[in-house]
Amino acid sequence: MSKAATAKKVVVVPVKTLEVIDGVQQQVKKRVAAYCRVSTDSEEQKESYTNQVNHYTKHIQSNSEWEMADIYADEGITGTNTKNRANFNRMIQDARNGKIDLILVKSISRFARNTLDLLKYVRELKSLGVAVLFERENINTLDTTGEVLLTILSSLAQDESRNISENSRWGILRGFQNGKVFCNTTRFLGYDKDQNGELVINEKEAEIVRRIYEEYLEGKSCEAIAKGLMRDKIKTVTGGDRWWDSSITIILTNEKYYGALLQQKTITVDFLTHKRIKNQGQEQQYLIEENHEPIISKEMFEAVKKEKERRAKLKSNILGDRKKYSSKYPLSSKVFCGCCGTNFKRRTWNSNSASKKVVWQCRTYVNEGKDACDSKAVDEHVLQDAFVRVFNRMYDNKDSFIRTLKANIQTILSKREDNEPLHEVEQNIEQLKMDLKALVNLKLRNQIDDDVYDEENARITQQLEELRQNETMLRKDHEQKVHVKERINEIIKVLTTRQESLEQFDDSLFHALVEKITILSPAHFVFTLKSGMEITS
């Protein structure tokens, strides 16, 4: 008989459910886990969560062919992504480590409402030989039809999540329109919520808020206010010791402190990731006036707002407007002659090679000739490169440089400290005004001789004029000190915030730091910073 005529014999090899260990057959049990989740913290959902855990514990233990691997449960966590579901992620890792054969889940929506997440993890588990059994949909992911059904059903689950998100958003918007308060006070300094959800003042914290507003209007910066709170060992709203100037800024711009409430400051742009962004007009906002008892007056809030705008404008003048200084003449009005003191003007020279060369020349030399001033022209690139070198010297030694700048601040503030202070001048002015008033009263009652009156009146009037001139000078001196101090602080800020040295000329950085450049020779310059400090290049 030929081989072709030989009948083929097919033997079915059964699934192995037994193992032989040391000659004794052992039953191999399937390691089964269950995953449970509820998406809110309500009492009803907590009961559902407990019921799920109890159900799966009994269900697995009642099957003689199953062995309990673990019950993985997340409570009060959203299902639209798996990023923050600690026990879900622990379950996946245990599956990777070979500790699980089968995972039981009530439904697809309990596992994930995000199609991409669902398919990602199901496919990974499938590659590991781990099945997921969705009870409500009766899907076993190791079946051949499992993935097709999963794709369809998970899309439905994702639509369900979108509908829930949109319905929730609609409810919140209706609440905004009806004046309902949506405000978290867990990290909100100055207020708590009563049993009805209304904002009520926390008086101990409110004192801190009032102090912050008052000190800002007294002239303190946000940084200085923060340092003062730390110096006085005042705790933050979360019980921390560190106050940040950004936290002070938030408090100073929060309308809740004058009793109003602006709703929908942020909006959700992705219902799956729950990513929120600042609402800058994309969606309607709702301002509820007189919503709750204020900590500060609206007038104080508006005064702080105006003061912030004033300081921002001043800061802009110090740092310079980036657009203003992005022109092709960044050195204009900054370069001066070391011989005659006149400022330099920008000129373009045409060389024999048809290329142009930009230089800066003394106006006196250009207008009157070298007999009036013998200073030489300076190449613009040479000046710009010199600034780069000066800045990098400052940056490379910034710790020492900043110490020097801070010492300059102390010198400025202590300057003229022993001279007649402003408050003494003001007191003397008030006293002379009272003396003048008393003199007039004597005259009206005819209790003083005309000649004496005229002499005393002239004396007091002259003293008042001198004191007022002195007062004006002291005020200007004080304002100048503040201005220079702010300039120095801006230089310190530039140096501390910059992360690298300078590779090429930066016009905005130049205007933030440099008051003027004095040209001593074509290769020898003195940079005067806005703090008054001079650096030779």
Image (tube, helix red, strand yellow):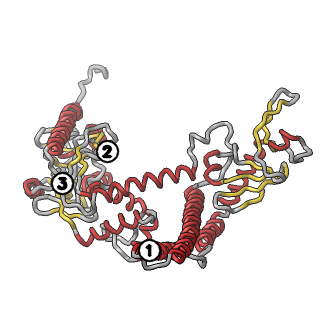
Badge number at residue 291: 3
Q: SS at mark 2?
A: strand
| Residue identified by numbered label 1 | 443
Q: Select label 2 or label 3 by which is in front.
A: 3
Q: Amino acid at mark 3?
A: Asn
The quadrant where residue 61 appears:
bottom left
The quadrant where residue 134 appears:
top left
Of 181 and 208, the residue lying toward us? 208
| Residue identified by numbered label 2 | 275
Task: Tell me: 465 left or right of 528.
Answer: left
Q: Amino acid at mark 1?
A: Lys
Q: Earlier in the sequence, mark 3 or mark 1?
A: 3
Q: Residue at x 11, y 57 (%)?
A: 46
Instruction: Please report contact status of discs 1 and 2: CB closer than 8 Å, yes or no.
Output: no
Give the vertical position of 503 relative to 295 (above or below).
above
Badge number at residue 166: none
Residue 211 visible within the image? yes
Category of crowding for the residue at label 1, using alpha-carbon neighbours closer than 10 angstroms: few (below 14), some (14–19), many (at least 20)? some
Q: Earlier in the sequence, mark 1 or mark 2?
A: 2
Q: SS at mark 3?
A: loop
Of 281 and 116, the residue lying toward us? 281
Q: SS at mark 1?
A: helix
Q: CA distance from mark 2 to mark 3?
A: 28 Å
List x then y, in percent, for residue 289: 21, 50
